[in-house]
Amino acid sequence: MNQIPIITKIVIILALIFSSVAESKIYKWTDDKGKVHFGDAPPSEEKAEELDEEELAKRMSSYTQVTVKFVPIDFGVNRQANILLMYTTSRCSYCAKARKYFAAQGIDYIEKNIETSDDYRLEFKKAGGKGVPLIFSGRYQMTGFSEASFKTMYAKSRP
């Protein structure tokens, strides 16, 4: 009786798992109420768009879409000229990158986690927030985080 060694079984199982992950697709569709959904299988009743990996990576990464702009009004988020304010979520890797950078540079800031406070989430929406981190320095607003873009914005925003 031929028995397959346990290591061979493990390798075969892992190969099957990873091949199915590599071939998984992401679909986007809008339901009849106008709500946008994403999933790994298209719904039977709605028309779904298959997202390609490159487009999906762009949508999921704030870092590749860093924007900095001058914001002439306050939006009711109670910003002060010399205080750095950052809206975050708990699982945001770019929020963590910004925190680490601020600590290394000795930059004081106020963090508002939009997952833990309805007030913070409302402020975030009033400010036009669509992605985190959302960073305010004086009258400048940065969505996403990159050190180079932050340095430029921070220098402009200092009195």
Image (tube, rainbow, N blue to C red):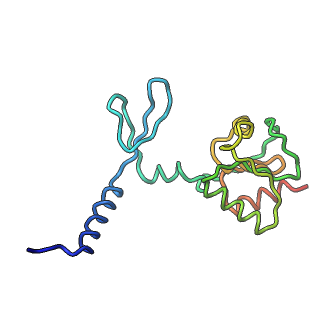
Using the rendered view, name the quadrant where residue 2 is placed: bottom left
**Residue drawn 58% across the image and 56% down it:** 64
Q: Residue furthest top?
A: 33
Say which of 70 and 61 sits in front. Answer: 61
**Residue drawn 45% across the image and 40% down it:** 38
Picture coordinates of residue 52, whole percent (x, y): 41, 49
Say which of 158 and 75 sits in front. Answer: 75
**Residue drawn 72% across the image and 65% down it:** 101
In this rendering, the answer to whether 1 lies above or below 18 is below
Say which of 12 and 150 sits in front. Answer: 12
Question: How many numbered discs, if any?
Answer: 0
Image quadrant containing the N terminus = bottom left
Image quadrant containing the C terminus = bottom right
Picture coordinates of residue 12, whole percent (x, y): 25, 67
Using the rendered view, name the quadrant where residue 11 is placed: bottom left
Q: Residue furthest right?
A: 159
Picture coordinates of residue 102, whole percent (x, y): 76, 63
Determine whether, in the image, residue 48 is placed left or right of residue 4.
right
Determine whether, in the image, residue 146 is placed left or right of residue 111.
left
Q: Residue furthest left?
A: 1
Picture coordinates of residue 117, whole percent (x, y): 71, 40
